Image: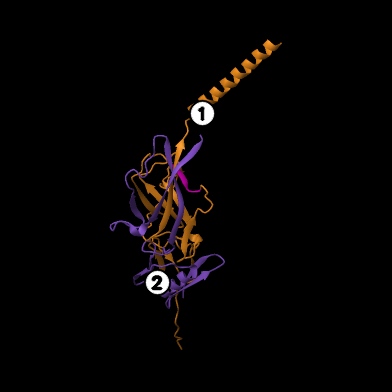
Chain colours: A purple, B orange
Amino acid sequence: MDINKTRTIFSFISSANRQSQEQSCNFTIDYPDGILSCCPNEYVEINVLSFDMPNTINNINSKNNEFEIITPNETLEKTIPSGNYSIKTFVAQLKNLIENDFITITYNEAQNTYIYKQR
Amino acid sequence: MKHKTHTFTNSDELIEVYKIKPISIGQLIGVLDNIEYEIGTSRYTTGLINLTNYNKIMVRTENVAYYYGNVENIRTNNNSVFNSNIIFWKSKADTEPFKILKYNNKDGGNSFVYKVENTQINSIIFQLRNERNEIITDAPDYMMVIQYNFDEKKDILNILISIDNIMEEMYQTILFAINRLKLLL
């Protein structure tokens, strides 16, 4: 089927200008009446031309940042602060949280694992 | 003379075993959540470390139906394939933290071009989701440019009828030429 482009409409969208009750991850764009209506012999295509977003999404957030250390006497609940961690900054944070006189943590670079050891 | 001796015995009760129990970090350190792992004096080695959490940033659209079923098996975990409403996706891991995650269709390619079934679009809901189909609630604001191309459909039946007419005209022309040649002979 041969096609002829009849018209093109660009829609420039900024999630920052969403309704106040909406989130940037879930918002609605309302188009003026009739602007995106096909004539009887037309169809429409959507084409994403450009997308820009700062990569500030944390890899450690409130959904994946909790663990417990269980000692013979007590259970210690630990929470890693949200942030963007690399393997080495993550192990540093773990050390801050749990390394004490009893437990050490090291990163095994060859195997990409963490080693916990009781002293 | 009676000798006084002391006997040392090994008692398990004296060994204090520490344990780690991931509540929600299991996926990051390659182990299961809510299971206690003994650290012990020998050592405890985690699974493979993967701090990516999730990688894909996907833009989904609600209120729009697409032609010719773009499909996906992402929305369920039982490999069921459904029509897709994803119009864009990009790997977060390709961009350093705190840099701009960007896509520009500079060459006019058709990587993210979708034919729409609706003949009228009044509103579109845009959702940012990851590859686990979770809404990315901590996503920052973003900018996006969408192009709507209106294309004219050409009816195949009319094209075939016009071809038929041309063939008919050619046949008549040849027939006319043959008749004229007979007259000359």
Residue B141 position by quadrant: bottom left
The main secondary structure of the magenta stretch is strand
Residue A42 position by quadrant: top left
Q: Is residue B51 visible?
A: no
Contact check, label 1 and label 2, Cβ < 8 Å:
no
- Position of residue B5 relative to residue A50, above or below, is below
Residue B47 on the magenta segment: no
What residue sits right under mark 1 in the picture?
A: B159
- Residue at screen point 51% across, 28% down: B159
- Position of residue B23 relative to residue A101, above or below, is above
Is disc 2 placed on a helix, strand or loop? Answer: helix
From the viewer's perspective, is A107 left or right of B146?
A: right
Span of residues in magenta: B111-115
Nearer to the camera, B81 or B30: B81
Residue flagged by tag 1: what amino acid is it? Answer: Ile
Q: Is disc 1 surrounded by few (<14), some (14 to 19) or many (20+) residues within 10 Å?
A: few
Name the subunit of mark 1.
B
Nearer to the camera, B162 or B64: B162
What is the spatial separation of the Cα atoms under label 1 and label 2, in whole angstroms?
Answer: 90 Å
From the viewer's perspective, is B123 left or right of A96?
A: left
- Residue at screen point 40% across, 72% down: B13
